[in-house]
Amino acid sequence: MTTVDTLQNKHDHGLDFSAYAYNQNLGWKGSLDDVSFEQTTIKDKLLALEKPCYIVKVAGKIGVTNEGYLYPNENNTTAQVELITSTAPINIQQLGDANFLSFHGVKYAYMTGAMAGGIASEEMVIALGKEKILSSFGAGGLSPERIEAAINRIQLALPHGPYAFNLIHSPNDMAIERRAVDLYLKYQIRTVEASAFLDLTANIVYYRVAGLSLNDANQIEIKNKVIAKVSRREVATKFLQPAPEKFLKELVEQGLITQLQAKLAAKVPMADDITIEADSGGHTDNRPLVCLLPSIIALRDEVQAQYNYEQPIRIGVAGGIATPQSALAAFMMGAAYVMTGSINQSCVESGACKHTKQLLAQAEMADVIMAPAADMFEMGVKLQVLKRGTLFPMRAQKLYEIYRTYDSIDSIPLPEKEKIEKQIFRKTIAEVWEGTATYLSQKNPEKLGKAVNNPKLKMALIFRWYLGLSSRWSSSGEKGREVDYQIWCGPAMGSFNDWVRGSYLSEPNNRRVVDVAHHIMTGAAFLYRIQSLKIQGMQISDYYSQYIPEPSVHFSITEV
Ligand SMILES: Cc1cc2nc3c(=O)[nH]c(=O)nc-3n(C[C@H](O)[C@H](O)[C@H](O)COP(=O)(O)O)c2cc1C
């Protein structure tokens, strides 16, 4: 049994208290045997999030317990055990906006973002969905048949959700966007993650408004949920507002939506959730989250004051979320939910090949760089990729510089042309063009016609062959092409690797998306407890602030 005398000579354990104690009228009662005075057992007590934590002082020594109870110490008598402060139990579900959980039927204010070409795979969406965590399938760049197969598989595995599908804006070919919307409506996909939109299109408006109806209580029901991902205020504004009149009129005329739906559309915003994307993997404006989030929250508040929506739009964040600290920071800044991206690509369930996952698991924060994007190559648009272990960024940049400098393939000096053929393409330019022309003659004869008469466009199409294939090589694990893998990745990856170094999650074979989600959220809740104790005046050594992921036996599913 622990007695007061035995506590006098304990060594320093990294806890102290500096502030005026506010708990003057409360005392703690319980057994001293339940109070920890040693680092490791104190940490276990702090980690018991489902229990309260009482910080007490016994014989001049600070200890921590989850047991016992508080009582009103009205006479302010000096007890043998002095209560310094306490924290309530914390449930992971308290982080973020509770409406996000109920609206999407999920257990965490955490979701994973789409990753094109099925990198955010069926396995990923299903694994997370089974644990009631929302995940967006990476439909971008996939054929309608491939998307349809994913829908069938995901709906079979998750008949009651949750899951989302990516609706990616495709400025160069609106038919792609429309085909995705048709599929989503046909199969009653109830949540889309709308991304890359610079402005609204008839397609996204069609998806949203076709899901509006009035229920028996005369309330508007929103069946088709939209989570819009944006990085700019102008675009956020479009999704914060109701659908534009001109699209509604067009859609009614085409018989795609009813007059009633068009009327209801005036009362609801285009999106239920807006994910603010800061410096992320792939397409990014490289904005810092701490600047972007307050600005968009203020914008949302302005729009809410104007439209007075029954359910205000939630603002979530993406870009750099990779650790308990980053998630907690986002929640403390007012984020309704957090979204991860890059880190999931290194997980077992992602559609990337083994070699890519290994490279990602070794990446440091500075191992990323902006490189030319295949889809908007001619416009000079760049996206964030991994640079360590691959020559893709340098080679893509070289191609872009040549494209900028010369007007046609024929005007490229011979030594330069030979370098492209030998080092980058490993084929002759003529062979690449032949393959490209055959492909376009089936898929887009109009473009082929234009390219034949426009040497600069022809050069862009030839270069884009490399940029397009290099992403696929990274997914399929093309042997011999490892140095050309195009791997979208943001600084989040290095940040994650720093956090998990030395833990079981440092090994990519152990990285499961559910574990990652669970540890980020649990760690955020733990750090919240630590920070709240600090704010109350506790001085806590760094040892206690480290949340180290450990393999969990089972993550229970909480009904929502
Ligand atoms: C490999 C990869 C592919 C991506 N593809 C898409 C996509 O097709 N559609 C989309 O909306 N976002 C895409 N993203 C962005 C993610 O959904 C997410 O918003 C972003 O990765 C979050 O930032 P982070 O990388 O810092 O975690 C992609 C990101 C990565 C890393």
Image: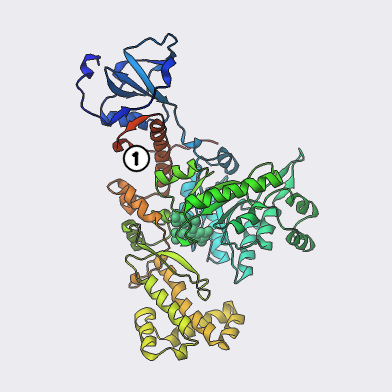
- Residue displayed at 32% across by 73% down: 480
Horizontal arrangement in the rendering, residue 326 relative to residue 375 (left or right): left
Residue 281 sits above or below residue 553 on the image: below
**SS under mark 1:** loop
Which of 350/365 is in front? 365
Which of 230/18 is in front? 18
Q: Position of residue 148 (x, y in %)?
A: 57, 60
Q: Which residue is mark 1?
A: 547
- Residue displayed at 52% across by 44% down: 335
Quadrant (top left/top right/bottom left/bottom right) for the N terminus: top left
Residue 362 sits in which quadrant?
bottom left
Residue 517 sits in which quadrant?
top left
Number of marks = 1
Looking at the rendered structure, the kind of residue marked 1 is Tyr
Residue 347 sits above or below residue 419 on the image: above
Q: Position of residue 314 (x, y in %)?
A: 59, 45
Q: Position of residue 496 (x, y in %)?
A: 36, 51
Quadrant (top left/top right/bottom left/bottom right) for the C terminus: top right
Q: Position of residue 80 (x, y in %)?
A: 31, 12
